[in-house]
Amino acid sequence: MRNRLTFLITATLLSPLAAGVSQAAPAGGYTMPATQVLDMASDTDKPYRIMVSYPESEPPESGFPVLYVLDGNASFAAFAETRRIQEYGDLGKAIVVGVGYRTDKPYDEARNEDFIVMDDPPPGKRLGRTAGKSGRDEFLDFLTGKLRTEIGKRYRINPDRQALFGHSFGGLFALHALYTRPQAFHSIVAASPSLELDEGVLRDERAFVARLEDGKVGKTSRLMIVVGERDIDDDPEPARALADRLDRLSGLGMRVRFRSYETEGHMTVPARAVTDVLRFAFEIR
């Protein structure tokens, strides 16, 4: 018995794992569980890479709620893995859709035409309006039309609980979605929106508020604005002021939440905000 015990201890100590020697990794990169990737094109033939994180449990009778995450190449993984871990509770019983581009880079220049509009764009850049429509409007058509339809074919979703997350330029786009199609999403999150960049964002806000005050909007998206107090690219104060202005419209049905992260800057806000965003997007109110 003593010899057998001595052999087992010696074998364990001499094993590669016990000696701190790592085993060879499987060939290829890491594949995130419970995900699917598909390439799609919009009705204007603009290419996108769509990343989906889905629950492995049965959907509720009403279908799974859905969160669309812009800049999916940069942000999808954090949202997807957090959702998967939270599947032990109700928070993870939802679908996360990352909307990105056909690249391995976290950000692609194509996002500029999708997210922002400028009054005087640089030559050759479609950042303005053409025949009354912009690339941003076409992207919103894709999100709420062709893409949403495709996700609905593949998964059982709740059409009344669709949420949107956008950061930086994407935060501007999220606000544009609120102002122009206030019923398209149940909840919208604008993270560190680059308010100083888009000259038309204040005009869009004023037009939206006028319609809301005239009773022409009806039910509108819930909005959360998140910022980092160490944001030196986009001062958090304009975003805080925007939240204050819209919060005054609560009597007209506008619901606004503001969250500030003391130690975060412009590029670190999305990762810090993941759980707060999932809670806001998927809670029932």
Image (cartoon, rainbow, N blue to C red):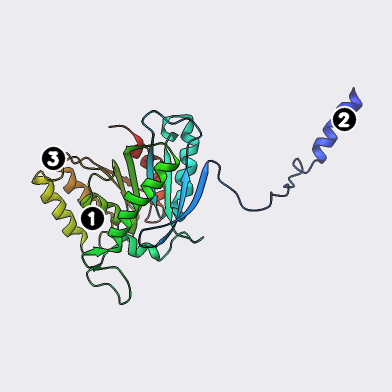
Nearest the eye: 110 or 279: 110
Residue 29 seen by the camera: yes
Residue under the image location 37 percent in, 46 percent down: 149
Q: Nearer the viewer, mark 2 or mark 1?
A: 1
Q: Nearer the viewer, mark 2 or mark 3?
A: 3
Amino acid on which disc 1 is placed: Pro
Residue under the image location 39 percent in, 64 percent down: 110
Q: Which residue is mark 3?
A: 252
Number of the label disc, if any, that sits on residue 6 = 2
CA neighbours of label 3 inside 10 A, class few (<14), some (14 to 19), many (20+): some
CA neighbours of label 2 inside 10 A, class few (<14), some (14 to 19), many (20+): few
Amino acid on which disc 3 is placed: Leu
Gap between marks 2 and 1, in whole Å?
69 Å
Residue extending farthest left: 214
Q: Residue 29, position in %: x, y?
A: 62, 52
> Is residue 170 shown above or below 127?
above
Number of the label disc, if any, that sits on residue 196 = none
Residue under the image location 20 percent in, 62 percent down: 200
CA neighbours of label 1 inside 10 A, class few (<14), some (14 to 19), many (20+): some
**Who comes first in sequence, dot 2 or dot 1?**
2
Position of the C terminus by quadrant: top left
Q: Which residue is mark 1?
A: 238
Amino acid on which disc 2 is placed: Thr
> Is residue 79 shown above or below 71?
above
Residue extending farthest right: 3
